[in-house]
Each structure stands twice: as C-alpha cells, then as structure tokens.
Image: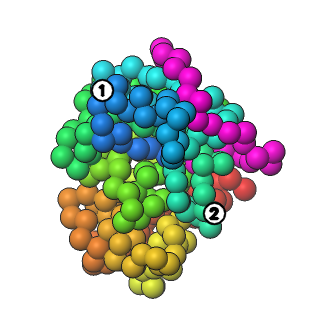
Amino acid sequence: MNAIDLPSPNHAPRPADAIIDVLVLHYTELPLKESLDILCDGARAHRVSAHYVLAEDGMVHRLVPEDRVAWHAGRSYWRGRATLNATSVGVEIVNLHGDRHDYPKPQIAALIELCHGILGRHPAIVPRNVVGHSDIAPKRKTDPGLRFPWAMLAEAGIGLWPRAGARPFAGDVQAGLERFGYPPAVGVATADIVASFQRRFRPGRADGIADPETRALLADLLDQARAEALSAG
C-alpha cells in the first residue's frame, strides 16, 4: 500500500491491556487539505486525529501509528463498551457529505486495500466490529453517510451486510439492536438508534420506524453475528 506519512501530534498510548478490535469509518466533511490541517493541528482546544485519511484519488495519508490511540470516535459505544478510541483504528475518508456525494471508485478500491491490511494486522476486528461513526454515535453523527457502499465492502470481506428473506425479528427492537452492538436508549430515543441502523443497512429509507423490513434485516444480522461468535469459539 502506497501511503504518505504525515505525523499528527494528536495521539496517546494505548492502555496496556487494550486489544484493537474495532474499525471505525468516517467521512471528513471537508476537502483534503483542510481535513489534514485540522487532524494535524496540535494547538486546537479540542484536538482530533485519525490513523489514516483517504483522499478522493485513493492516496492514503498515515497520521497516527496503529499502536497509538487516535482521537476520532469521541463519545461512542459499541457492544457494551464506551469511549472506543482506546481499542479502535479510525479512517477518515474525504467526502463533503456522504448523504449527497458518491465515493469515487479509486477511493473505494484503496479503502478496501487499506481495510484488508488493518484487518490482517488486527484479527480481533471481526466483521460485526467494522462500523461507521453513525453506528457508534447515533443521532450525533451521520458519517460515512447514506451513499457509502457498505454492501461492496462486505462483498470484499469487510463488515457485514444483511441477506434477504429472513423472518422479521419478533422481540423488542431496542433489545435486538443492543444485542447486535448498538447503544442503549440513554440520551437518544430508540427511533434515533433505528435510524442509525437503517442508515447503515437500509439507506434508501432511514426513517427511524422499526417496520417489518427493518426487523427482517436485524434478524438476519443477529443470525450472522451468532454464527460469527460460534466460529470464533
């Protein structure tokens, strides 16, 4: 993988017992230069960073070593754990707004290569733990956006994608979402969490309504998560 090293001063040691087991994908909401300026600015009151920034042409900028904590996730929660910076790798993808702008093919091809490398170095990042910022911070964050090609990444072995034909999940939808990994409805409504789930897995209609189609997608993903857990032993 070709990469430009552009060290950011915004990082910290990983906790001694930390296992890197989450990959978080973001969009920058700013052009490349402005994004790099912010992520490499050590004088900001609220310093931020990411391990990688991926330009629209596919060029990778390496800002923080993977064995260090980058400050990209903020207030976050996934699978029973909060403040995910300590155990995650963060990739910022240049896109002004992923709800309105497609991701160029060279950029996605480079992202797939980058993700394969990250997953190879950190086998604890199981498919369910490849997430968007909107998954781990419902309502607060919307990236990487409705136009992000999650299905294409899943086809390449990065993350999960629901299969058609499952029977709708019949239980409490909030409990089902939490079982998959989403946060409890504390500070946000269940509808906000449903909308985040839909942004990821049914981007054509992210209305926050747990209708039969949404419940069927959740049921299949829970089945895939169970199979994943069994295969991990």
Q: Nearer the viewer, residue 8 or 153?
A: 8
Amino acid under label 1?
A: Glu
The answer to whether 205 appears left or right of 153 in the picture is: left
Amino acid under label 2?
A: Arg
Magenta range is: 1-22
Dot 2 or dot 1, earlier in sequence: 1
The answer to whether 233 appears left or right of 134 in the picture is: right
Check disc 2 and report the residue beneath it: 81
Predominant secondary structure in magenta? loop
Q: Locate residue 51: give its quadrant.
A: top right
Residue at the spot x=51%, y=50% of the render? 73
Residue 203 on image: x %, y %: 26, 57
| Quarter of the image with the C terminus in it | bottom right
Residue at the spot x=46%, y=76% of the render? 187
The colour scheme of the drawn protein is rainbow
Residue 139 on image: x %, y %: 36, 66
Asked if residue 155 shows in the view, the reply is: no
Q: Is residue 10 magenta?
A: yes
Q: CA distance from mark 2 to mark 1?
A: 32 Å
Residue 60 on image: x %, y %: 44, 22
- Up-down: is 21 above or below 140? above
Q: Which mark is residue 56?
A: 1
The answer to whether 114 appears left or right of 70 in the picture is: left
> Is label 1 in a helix, a strand or a loop?
loop
Pointer 2 with pointer 1, Cβ within 8 A: no
Q: Locate residue 173: give its quadrant.
A: bottom left
The answer to whether 138 appears left or right of 18 in the picture is: left
